[in-house]
Image: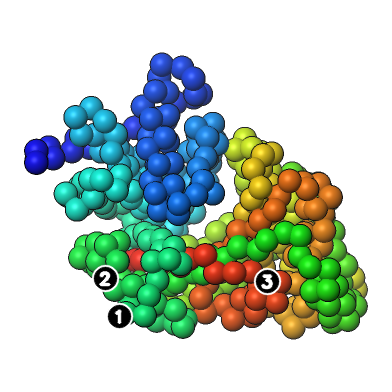
Amino acid sequence: MRETPAPTIAELTIPTSVGVPESAAFEAMVAVMNGVQVSLWNNDDFVYSAEAELASLRAQEFHEKIVFIAVVDGVIVGRVIADFPLEQDAVTATLLVDVVPALRGRGIGSALLAKGEDIVADGGRTIIAAYTEHPVATLHDGPVVRAEVGPSGLPADAPDVRFAQHHGYRLGQVERFSCLDLPMPDERKNALLADAVAHSRDYRTVSWWRAAPDELVDEFAALKERMTVDIPQSGIALDDEQWTAARVREHENELDARGEPLLTTVAQHIPSGHLVAYTEITVPDDGDKAEQYDTLVAVAHRGHRLGALVKLENLRRLAAHAPHIRRILTWNADENAPMLAVNDAFGFELRGLTGTWQKTLA
């Protein structure tokens, strides 16, 4: 068996468009990463077009994204993306490392990770986040690695877990990846709605497609800013995010450019007029799955079934707007018992676990 040559690690130029000679390497990288996702999940739920991936990588106003690829014998076999939040006091950066399955265990992932860590250090950041993904079929009853909080653990013998630990990363949080088949049974939906309405008499829902109304965008931005403050984050460090109307518009435009515009429902407190909860779904033009993005209820307004209320209204709007969607994918912190209870009541089923790992640079 021929020994695999050492990879060449090179920065990938992000093109201005696809379908031109300058985008060939970028499009090849996207195709390789799509293959990695199909191999992991045994489906195409996380296969994205080059146009969609380019839209995300070119959205750099609030996050700087740098890509390096690993090349062996002229073929792209892996990549690392370094993602830097651009808040003034930010101390974190995220590294996304992937290698084609056939060449794992040969030092390529380590070389990409080392390059990413060098970039993070050069950028003055001190905390690195990275992720591992574990489909439900790979979970078992053997030894597990646990975060500081939450009932779930990741398989201790999983190659990705061993890789993270070998390189000095600590498991900070586990997220549950779940799926809801649509439409929901009427009996379940009606019972949830009756309960939510009975507990939320002082609230009403407001929904929009693609873009927040101008008269609500500033307050919606303030609510989104609570996502890094009010969500469970016991074992991980997060930079506070500053959200403005301009950032909301940039986020909306990025998802529009990806071909996955947002469907959003908020809860408005009637006596005060303030927005106090929201939920978002990205809705692709084709395919049968959509992805649940943020869901948040402001701390002062919890206990009124607002999470269920906004989700039910968003699903009602989704059925009318995009009847081709038959599944919703969502991710929730393993320790977020209230939101997980809502998901269980809706009928979400576990599809896998995601580990958030962190490392502090010396």
Q: Quadrant of the C terminus?
A: bottom left
For marks 3 and 2, the one nearer the N-term is: 2
Q: Which residue is mark 3?
A: 347
Contact between marks 1 and 3 (CB within 8 A): the answer is no
> What's under tag 1, amino acid-wise?
Pro
Q: Provide residue 17's location: percent of width, then percent of height.
A: 51, 23
**Left or right position of 182 against 43:** right
Q: Quadrant of residue 225?
A: bottom right
Q: Provide residue 218's location: percent of width, then percent of height.
A: 74, 54
Q: Is residue 171 above or below residue 258?
A: below
Snapshot colouring: rainbow
> What's under tag 2, amino acid-wise?
Asp
Q: Secondary structure at mark 1?
A: loop
Q: Which mark is residue 143?
A: 1
* Residue drawn 41% across the image and 61% down it: 133
Q: Which residue is mark 2?
A: 157
> What's under tag 3, amino acid-wise?
Gly
Q: Provide residue 222's location: percent of width, then percent of height.
A: 69, 60
Q: Quadrant of residue 223?
A: bottom right
Contact between marks 2 and 1 (CB within 8 A): the answer is yes
Q: CA distance from mark 2 to mark 1?
A: 8 Å
Q: Provide residue 58's location: percent of width, then percent of height.
A: 50, 35
* Residue drawn 49% across the image and 69% down it: 175
* Residue drawn 24% across the image and 66% down it: 162
Q: Is residue 245 above or below residue 239?
A: above
Contact between marks 3 and 2 (CB within 8 A): the answer is no
* Residue drawn 44% across the image and 79% down it: 152
